Image (tube, rainbow, N blue to C red):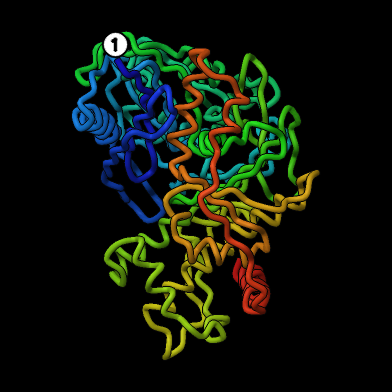
Amino acid sequence: MKSFILSLDQGTTGTTSLLIDSQSLEVVDKVNQEFKQIYPKPGWVEHNLNDIWKTVQSTVAAILERNNINGSQIISIGITNQRETTCAYKTDGQPLTNAIVWQDRRTSEFCKEASSDYQSLQKKTGLPLDPYFSGTKMRWLLENNDAVYEASQANDLKLSTIDTFLLYKMTNCKTFKTEPSNASRTLLMNLESCSWDKELLEFFGVKEELLPDIVDSFTNFGETQGLDFLPDGIPISCILGDQQAALFGQAGYKSGDLKCTYGTGAFILLNTGEEMVYSKNGLLTTVAYQYQGKPYYALEGSCYIAGAAVQWLRDNLNIIESSPDVETLAANVKDLGQMEHLIFLPFFTGIGSPYWKAEAKGAIIGLTRDSGKAELARACLDGIALSVQDSIAAIEADSPKPVTEVKVDGGACQNDLLMHIQASFSQKEIQRPKTVETTAYGVALGSLIGIQMNKMSDLDKLWKLDKSFNPSDDEYYPRKSKQWGETIKKLF
């Protein structure tokens, strides 16, 4: 009887269940289901945790039924997740409130007021004090949500990121654990020890007993129990934050490996191995993964908005029917000269790397009477690529090794025009693999390491090139890049 690996990729806009043949390691099938985005106030973004759990249930059930597979044929499960999104729930697994999403900016004022006090602690976390990260959200929940505060007083509160919430639910509330690629995004974990830090916990007013235990990224986190869509006893053997899972899926387990994922946002990671490299250029120092008790680190550039900018064109302006249509529409612009002055700043939820401006807003600058749908579409793609290029430039400045190519993945990397634009602004070869679902694929491969069926070195032979994109020498790209930098300095 055939056996399979199940990967759960819980993302910002939906959940994907991915099924992989455990022998060939080929993707068998995937099922995705979106869920509602909740915007209670300007700058606030929430998810209903019950909605998220339902998408896990339904996508797993659907993929098993569609492929006529019995749950007992699954030998391991990997979980990957939107990282900084913060959950509060009771000890019985019932949510106390909506999750606060990583994009949420409600803690901006606290971050501004506390920034000078935090500076002495920044080396412990490798992160700036920004609303992006979970510790600020946990503090806000404890101080502003009555249900969360009352549960904490009654010793009936769990605080975590999404990975732990799913693990807790899948193990019938038996396993409350996380691992360093997620814990390093909370502002509460000490990078060096990969454990919760007493000084950081005090700073944010979070008690350690409310948080999950931190263990290796590849281990037996627990086994399924009490589910109506999977049998008991399947080991959950790998958990990685989504960007680290994508790095792993790109065979990026060694120092010097680099990837950029284009999803809701765009995130570029450079593996620095066992060395913690502190950026001088606005990047984050984070944990790539922990294996056999040893942490491996990465530098990260974070662009909050990438694919979400295209969704904005689709949902708010209605100039395209589906996200892939943006490529065809943007390609209608024949004269790039008329595009130099048109700057699309996709900063709907502030600027991440390398500027870290939480208060920044999106903008379209340089509109003229001849600016139409095609020009807006092209400007949007340029804006995404230029935002990513700011992080690539910072990576180049910080990296001890030269950067000659960038491996890409995620849904938006299937847009050939965007990849050509990225290569041209960055003056790097862009390499797209045959498997672009590297986030889900990476954590599935990690689950085999977790049950000791695979080795790290096996990843290299699985990576296969689909297409590479080479830079254009058109003067449009350096000229627009210069305008981009000048515009950001002027506005922010």
Seen in the picture, residue 118 relative to 480 is either above or below; the reply is above
Residue that lies at the very extreme toward the right in this rendered image: 400
In the image, residue 173 lies at what x, y percent? 33, 13
In the image, residue 165 lies at what x, y percent? 37, 24
The quarter holding residue 315 reads: bottom left
Nearer to us in this view, 258 or 2: 2
Seen in the picture, residue 101 relative to 262 is either above or below; the reply is above
In the image, residue 384 lies at what x, y percent? 52, 62
In the image, 155: left or right of 347?
Answer: left
For the C terminus, the image quarter is bottom right
Nearer to us in this view, 16 or 119: 16
Seen in the picture, residue 158 relative to 363 is either above or below; the reply is above
Residue ID for mark 1: 225
Residue that lies at the very extreme toward the bottom in this rendered image: 369
Residue 376, can we see it? yes
Residue visible at 43% across and 35% down?
440
Residue visible at 42% across and 91% down?
369
Q: Amino acid at mark 1?
A: Gln
In the image, 168: left or right of 379?
Answer: left
Residue 142, can we see it? no
Seen in the picture, residue 422 relative to 82 is either above or below; the reply is below
The quarter holding residue 330 reads: bottom left
Residue visible at 39% across and 40% down?
11
Identify the element where label 1 is drawn. Answer: loop
